[in-house]
Amino acid sequence: MQADRLNRVVLTGGSSGIGLAIAQAFLDDGYEVITISRRDCPLKSPRLTSLTADLADAKATYATVMSVAARQPATTIVHCAGAIREKPIEQATLADLEELGNLHLGAALSLLQANLPAMKQARYGRIVLISSRAALGLAKRTAYSATKAGMLGLARTWALELAPHGITVNVVAPGPIANTEMFEEIIPPASAKMAAAAKQVPVGRFGTPQDVARAVTFFTDPKASFVTGQTLFVCGGTSVGSIHY
């Protein structure tokens, strides 16, 4: 059982975009992958279990992750599910903050609490939270930036508490990543806005979901045991300056 746990990952948001690329990367590395998303994961593998749930619903999320952990406890967690809610300040609502707080922060806590007993028993764990370059601030992202920034605080706090148990907690913060639903909500593909935004990225291009997946698999590698509480911006240099899109 313990050997299974060490090769099992629970991944949220694995049905498309960045999450889908992360799911594929873990399958390629021989992991058993359990995805929890709004939609089924389109990948096909005997090592893949795809579950659907609304992770913005706190009660439903808790029930789902506790049920999964009771049957298939994992020692690797990647929380990738997210939503933006782009609005100017005047239109931002408390409901936005509550919904994205549940999705970005509450779901992370439920995932950890469900699988923490297995991690402590194994004296091993890898947790990666997918935040955003917007955690540093981005116009019209009140609820998104606030809750994505909260992930950095979660990771640093959990890293301190869990280090004695062999569990690391880190954050990957993507910048503009093309070929994802969230990015295309803001910038339609092949639009003039897309070409203008690409010019703001220091490396001269948008990122790919695979760029982010590579950062995730670095943090989840069993050999990465001396790296915890860190945030890695996979952003083409946009975290160094500013970007508007």
Image (spheres, helix red, strand yellow):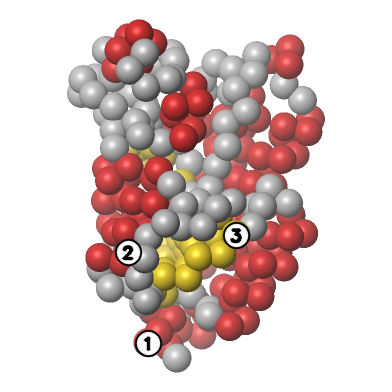
Residue at screen point 37% across, 28% down? 176
Residue type, label 2: Phe
Q: Is residue 209 left or right of residue 148?
A: left
Q: Position of residue 160 (x, y in %)?
A: 51, 60
Q: Secondary structure at mark 2?
A: helix
Work out which quarter of the rendered image holds the C terminus and state it: top left
Which labelled disc corresponds to residue 52?
3
Residue type, label 1: Ala
Q: Is residue 1 left or right of residue 197?
A: right
User: 241 and 106: which one is in front?
Assistant: 106
Q: Secondary structure at mark 3?
A: strand
Q: Seen from this angle, which residue lies furthest left? A: 203
Q: Is residue 168 left or right of residue 84?
A: left
Which labelled disc corresponds to residue 3?
1
Q: Is residue 103 above or below residue 147?
A: below
| Label 3 or label 1, whichever comes before in sequence order | 1
Residue type, label 3: Thr
Which labelled disc corresponds to residue 76?
none
Q: Secondary structure at mark 1?
A: helix
Q: CA distance from mark 3 to mark 1?
A: 26 Å
Instruction: Please state which of the two labelled residues, at mark 3 or mark 2, is closer to the viewer.
Output: 3
| Label 3 or label 2, whichever comes before in sequence order | 2
Q: CA distance from mark 1 to mark 2?
A: 16 Å
Q: Position of residue 119 (x, y in %)?
A: 50, 77
Residue bearing the label numbered 2? 26
For disc 1, the neighbor class at 10 Å (few under 14, some 14 to 19, many from 20) is few
